[in-house]
Amino acid sequence: MEDQAQALRELMNSSKPAPKAPERPGVQSGPERKTRIIAVTSGKGGVGKTNVSVNLAIAYAKIGKKVIVMDADLGLANVNIMLNVIPKHNLYHVIRKQKTMRDIIYDTDYGIQIVAGASGFSKIANLSEDERQSFIDELYALSQADIVIIDTSAGVSSNVLSFVAAADEAIIVTTPEPTAITDAYGIIKIIATEVENLNIGLKLVVNRAKTVIEGRKVADRIIEISANFLNLKVEYLGCIFDDPVVPQAVLRQKPFIVSDPKSKAAISIQHLVGRLEKTEFEADAGLGRFIRKLFGKE
Ligand SMILES: Nc1ncnc2c1ncn2[C@@H]1O[C@H](COP(=O)(O)OP(=O)(O)O)[C@@H](O)[C@H]1O
Ligand SMILES: [Mg+2]
């Protein structure tokens, strides 16, 4: 523990030049491509997960993908508020069998659909066998989407870990703040130690970067310490610039990628999509595996 903390401190103060990111071959998306599940998470709260989830989803929709954002930040109806919509029904109603998943998938004006979370949906592990089975059946309704983005809450809970473990990829969001960096490493460490058969891609996004160099430096510290202490490969997806349009858009309840498509923040998001599209997506991954893993059957 001690040497790890020390190493992290050293890394935080290091000013080594950034090594080049390894290039991965692009993968063509064919008509048979399965649903890609991306969990967005962080160590510290308030670092930009919901903004990343929603704006990334809209950017994907703009290039013709069918995207569903699932709000798994239970208790806080973040996604709804950011889009200024009030779905009447949520995952709670699906689990209670009052609604089907199809009933609750909510169309927005932005070309994406959302699934609202539920505070009653507090522990996937605590569902009865009957509820669990019907929920599993309902989850398959999400296969109509090309991409499902899951906006999780910050930090460790069995739910966050379940979603992260089950996804094809987890995007860890951090900011350049030292506390956000240490917490990002913290959540990566917990994912690495708690998740069995970890075979998902861990991707890092540095939000609120002042410069590309700052983003890269923050990412390198986290990537290096994850490699050294956890033997874990974390890939840098890119940064999102700190941009006043973001809080303005949140206040107006209209995503910045729509209200300010030429802003630095919006362009950053488009770059992230470009990079995500270049990364491999295993053919045997997708919704079926997601559901099996979410319920610990794999
Ligand atoms: N790139 C950015 N530039 C400026 N402010 C940002 C940026 N990203 C996030 N913020 C600020 O941080 C707040 C929290 O973002 P949010 O997406 O709700 O975080 P989380 O979902 O991680 O709690 C936003 O309301 C906004 O004020
Ligand atoms: Mg949020």
Image (cartoon, rainbow, N blue to C red):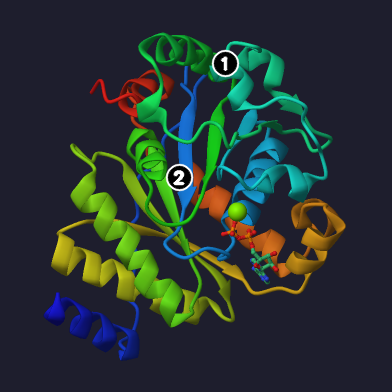
| Disc 2 element | helix
Q: In which quarter of the image is ligand 2?
A: bottom right
Provide residue 253's location: percent of width, then percent of height.
Answer: 83, 53
| Disc 1 element | loop
Closer to the chain start, of discs 2 and 1, is 1
Instruction: Give the residue type that dot 1 points to.
Output: Arg
Q: In which quarter of the image is residue 61?
A: top right
Q: Is residue 38 left or right of residue 100?
A: left
Q: In this view, does 230 lie above or below 132?
A: below
Figure quadrant of the C terminus: top left
Q: Is residue 160 left or right of residue 117?
A: left
Q: Residues within 10 Å of mark 1 (few under 14, many from 20)?
A: some
The residue lying at 22 percent from left, 52 percent from top is 192
Q: In which quarter of the image is residue 160?
A: top left
Figure quadrant of the N terminus: bottom left
Q: Does the image show residue 2?
A: yes
Provide residue 94's location: percent of width, then percent of height.
Answer: 59, 17
The residue lying at 42 percent from left, 81 percent from top is 178
Q: Does the image show residue 19?
A: no
Residue that numbered label 2 is attached to? 278
Q: Is residue 279 left or right of residue 83?
A: left
- Mark whose residue sits in front, 2 or 1: 1
Q: Is residue 86 left or right of residue 63?
A: right
Residue that numbered label 1 is attached to? 96
Q: Is residue 100 above or below residue 269?
A: above
Q: Residues within 10 Å of mark 2 (few under 14, many from 20)?
A: some
